[in-house]
Image: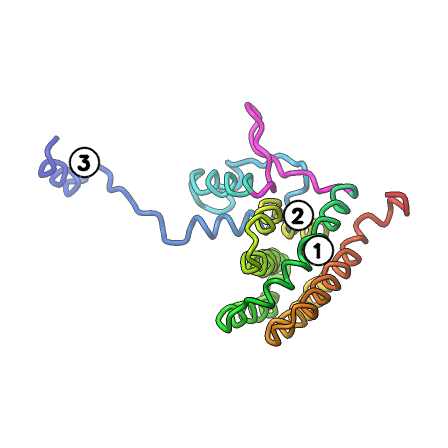
Amino acid sequence: MTEALKRQNVTRGLVPRRLKRPAGLGETVYEHILAELMSLRIAPSSRINIDTLAREMGVSQTPIREALSRLEEQGLVVKTHNVGYSAAPQIDAVRFNELYDLRLLLEPEAAARTAARISDAEIKALADLTRRMNGSGANDARGSYSRFAMLDAEFHDRILKLCGNSLIYEALSRLHIHLHLFRLHFHAKVTSCAIREHEALGAAFVERDSEKARRAMKRHIELSRERFMVTFADLGPNM
């Protein structure tokens, strides 16, 4: 069929017009499913029905599958052959402690190195992220919580990228630590405390004070560990 004939048939209604996907639809679908996972409305280890999600959101299966593939890369969903997608199980106490041990080994050093080399533009970018985190909870607390988790991850990723050691960045970024931690439980206090600690880090960067940045990051990680530790409180002291 020639292009001219195709155009004639489209005009006559004989060939369906190919509709373009609305800009940003894929990101909207991803953010919606992420919020469902982070708020535990999609329970850990539960099956994820693509047809149900598509009907609920009024979209085709294509953006749903794209979002789930992206979430699989982040370790938040699991795809099983001949079964489909399910929400990933939450990290256990052993994994939790291992992640924090790793963070305490690497992130304070990364913060110290970043303080010595950070530019004014990069300081502003980190401050802007902190402000966005502070405004992420205006409406829809559950959805805002997932947005905060993404911004928190970006904040820490920026510091790791700026430290000048690509292996430190690669070792931590591929674990998607912050998404897994914030998924442990919904707690508004987690966000307000983290913002204050990020501001302390920002102050150290403004002063280009490596030791102050090291201490601020160490304290932030230790306090974060205490906040999320409540998830495992029922397991007792020998978790």
Q: Earlier in the sequence, mark 2 or mark 1?
A: 2
What distance separates the C-alpha of mark 3 from that of mark 2? Answer: 50 Å
**Secondary structure found at label 2:** helix
Q: What amino acid is labelled 3 in the image?
A: Leu
- Residue 81 is a magenta residue: yes
For the N terminus, which image quadrant?
Answer: top left
Q: Position of residue 189 (x, y in %)?
A: 73, 64
Frontmost of labels 3 and 2 is: 2
**Which numbered disc covers residue 186?**
1
Q: What amino acid is labelled 1 in the image?
A: Phe
What distance separates the C-alpha of mark 2 from that of mark 1? Answer: 12 Å
Residue in the foreground of this view, choosing between 142 and 228: 228
Q: Which residue is mark 2?
A: 180
In the current view of this chain or complex, which residue is farthest to the right? Answer: 237
Q: Position of residue 165 (x, y in %)?
A: 57, 53
**Secondary structure found at label 1:** loop
**Secondary structure found at label 3:** loop
**Magenta-tinted stretch:** 74-92
